[in-house]
Image (cartoon, rainbow, N blue to C red):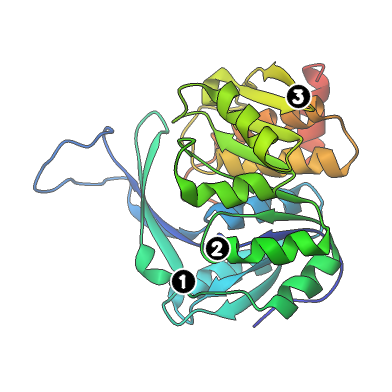
Amino acid sequence: MSGQADEAEVLVLGGAGVDTIVHVPELPLPYADSYMIDSGIRTRAGQTGDFVALGLAALGLRTHHLDLLGDDPEGDLVRALHAEHGIALTALPQPAGTKRAVNLVGPDGRRLSLYDTSRAHPDDRFPESTLRALAATSRHVHVTITQPCAHALPVLRETGVPLSTDLHDWDGENPYHEPFAYAADVVFLSAAALADPERTMRRIAERGRARTVVATAGAEGAHLLADGELTRIPAADPPAPVVDSNGAGDAFAAAFLYGRLSGEPPERCARYGAIAGAYACTVPAARADAIGRDELLRRAAATGR
């Protein structure tokens, strides 16, 4: 186990792993016996929890990441990423190995992710004593929807620390996501699989604890529900050509939380998120990078947001 007990502004729970990036000529990929990948096939650390932690740290927030990692090359990549960016990491042993995925990335930056579910088990748990100790020294906890975070929710709620979560492309029906949706104070999700984003957002707020729900909609911006009021947040202009959408939602969440912890109102937080998400879309999939605080604030000021 590595890590430190110093006070953190945000504890990120779960979502550590590695992705293998494959740039493909189109998505969906037509069947063929083989494809030649001239751009190379690269493996790098960085799944949803890693990217949220990276985004928070780049914005100057003291960040601690807790997850299960294997004693394997993939785990070494995750440890190295955190060390490089100064992110405290508590890595609990995972005999099944570090989580991994393959991301197929199309020319327009869209992706298809293939997750290896063999590297987690239903009985995986975070020790309660570890959860309580880290939550007690944090201002906020961001909970990913990866195993075993669902089992951590009751303990975290008992601590009284504010929670956020990202439901990603939830369809509004899959029961797996509901404990996360209804336990968090701030809920992020993608509108991609929602026929009626507002209805799903209001249901989350009515059935759970959230007073703020954000549904991101890519190039169409985002929907913000705060204290019962729905606001449309316009998309931000990317500062360079869009090359990969991987990590855009994580960047949005990190920048939103930066604004929230800085005392900004929800609409400004969401505009920070839009700027950070647009920046993330310009970062090649093989790199782990995030917008810094100075650039975020400069871009927000330049757009009057």
In the structure shown, which secondary structural element does the residue marked by tag 1 occupy? loop
**Real-space CA distance between mark 1 and mark 3, rounded to the nearest whole angstrom:** 40 Å
Give above or below for 229 relative to 73. Answer: above
Is there CB contact under 8 Å for labels 1 and 2?
A: yes
Amino acid identity at mark 3: Gly
Residue 144 appears anywhere in the view: yes
Q: Nearer the viewer, mark 1 or mark 3?
A: 3
Image quadrant holding the C terminus, namely top right
Residue at the far left in the pictured view: 33
- Residue 11 position by quadrant: bottom right
Nearer-the-camera pick, 286 or 160: 160
Residue at the far front in the pictured view: 207
Comes first in the chain, label 1 or label 2: 2
Amino acid identity at mark 2: Ala
Q: Nearer the viewer, mark 2 or mark 3?
A: 3
Judging by the rendered image, the residue that carries numbered circle 2 is 16
Judging by the rendered image, the residue that carries numbered circle 3 is 228
Query: Residue 130: which numbered mark, if any?
Result: none
Give above or below for 11 relative to 295. Answer: below
Give above or below for 160 relative to 273. Answer: below
Nearer-the-camera pick, 146 or 274: 146
Comes first in the chain, label 2 or label 3: 2
Judging by the rendered image, the residue that carries numbered circle 1 is 98
- Residue 96 position by quadrant: bottom left
**Real-space CA distance between mark 1 and mark 2, rounded to the nearest whole angstrom:** 8 Å
Image quadrant holding the N terminus, namely bottom right
